[in-house]
Amino acid sequence: MTIKSRILMSVAAFALAGTAPALAQTEIQWWHALTGANNDVVVKLAEDFNASQKDYKVVPVYKGSYPDTLNAGIAAFRAGQAPHILQVFEVGTGTMMSAKGAIKPVHEVMKEAGEKFDPNAYLPAITGYYSTAKGDMLSMPFNSSSMVMWYNKDAFKKAGLDPAKPPKTWPETFEAAKKLKAAGYDKCGVSNAWATWANIEQFGAWHNVALSTKVNGMAGFDAVLNFNKSPAFLKHWTNLVELQKDKTYDYSGRTNNGEGRFTSGECPIFLTSSGFFGNVKANAKFDWGNAPMPYYPDVQGAPQNSIIGGASLWVMGGKKADEYKGVAKFFTFLSDVDRQVKLHTESGYLPITKAAYEKVKASGFYKDKPYLETPILELTNKTPTDNSKGLRYGSLVQIRDIWSEELEAALNGQKSPQAALDAAAERGNQMLRQFERTAQR
């Protein structure tokens, strides 16, 4: 072959290469419900993943609140336009599990894509919530959290309380709230966000008291709510009702809309998610800390362990194999130890793998920032029992509204605490039976 021939062949090959279609990236839609600083985390994760390889592009899309995002995902699936990844808060776990065909279990996605995946690498207290009874992971944990008690150290000093010794029990917490109220915090001594998560779901687990039969719904959708028969629940609701009268305890709504009452300095003791860390760090103009949730010392075995909150990532059904491969690679990217360490230490959400937790602990990080370890210590306080593994009820979003209505009726003096508890269980059971009939079709 002459030199001229070689040149002509090279030119031809170059020309062909120039006209060949470029391989398109496979786009992965990720619908989520995070705002503010946590939305920035989501966007940064997608950008970093997209920059790490060229085959896939993750596109994060904010779809509103947790319930809004869940409803949007369900509606999109019915219309044949579901995203690849849907962030669903833990309350929607039962609903997603029963949606046969609408989801593709994470363990199947990872196996079919050939991605390295060991369920035992993840923290049991987190993955247990999102797994079948056989241990198969159905969704990928993402922004996991638990409920903790945030407190204003400056307010404690003003009230003559020791900020280094936050109250441990509910009686101690109520006494501290009374002193804070006397010191000028007259609108609210103690409060909480997520009314039913605090005063029913976490309360039951932390005191090792069942909410229902069937391992709180984890052993079957035919669970029957019976927490209204518990003396511990009656005592707690009775105390809240009594203390609401002079605002030693003051109700802050059904969701987390009232969290600003803590960062503004209005409520010096506030129970809410450990994921509140970012807002506290950014907005509280006082010295602050957090501590484990209070408990009633006369309830045998308390405190037990807390249950998780936050959300996980569900893979929607009906997608192509190469799209699932992209989802699997993104989940592997998210599970990287150093990435989990960074997410945990910067966002306050829990590390989802054992290796990430051990690495943070070994670094001495928690000595200076013990508030980021509080939820992990709560979750691992004791080996979970049937009453503290978690809960899995269909239509829990709607049931939470019912429970909130009944708690509000008691706090407003419209019903006695026992009548409100009875109605909460009875109306909740009606919703469970309705869901059970739908799930069996």
Image (spheres, grey):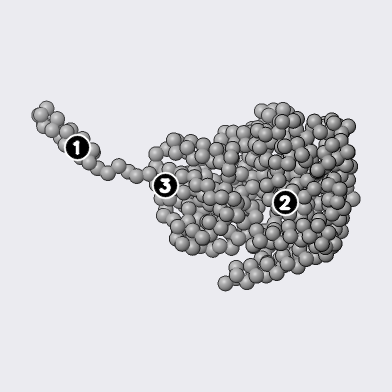
Q: Is residue 296 left or right of residue 90?
A: right
The residue wearing badge 2 is 253
Q: Which comes sooner in the sequence, label 1 or label 3?
A: 1
State the CA–CA distance, disc 3 to disc 2: 39 Å
- Residue, x 52% and y 44% (percent of image)? 331
Mark 1 secondary-structure assignment: helix
- Around disc 2, counting alpha carbons within 10 Å, would you say few (fewer than 14), some (14 to 19), or many (20 or more)? some
User: Hey, what amino acid is under mark 2?
Assistant: Gly
Mark 3 Cα within 10 Å, few/some/many (few <14, many 20+)? Answer: some
Label 1 crowding class (10 Å Cα cut-off): few <14, some 14-19, many 20+? few
Which residue carries the number 1 mark?
15
- Amino acid type of the residue tagged 1 in the rendering: Ala
> Which residue is drawn at the image coordinates 67% and 34% (left, top)?
283
**Residue at image location 45% in from the left, 48% down from the top:** 28
Q: Position of residue 71 (x, y in %)?
A: 56, 58
The relative height of residue 286 versus residue 227 in the rendered view (above or below) is above
The image quadrant where one finds the N terminus is: top left
Sequence-wise, the earlier of marks 2 and 1 is 1
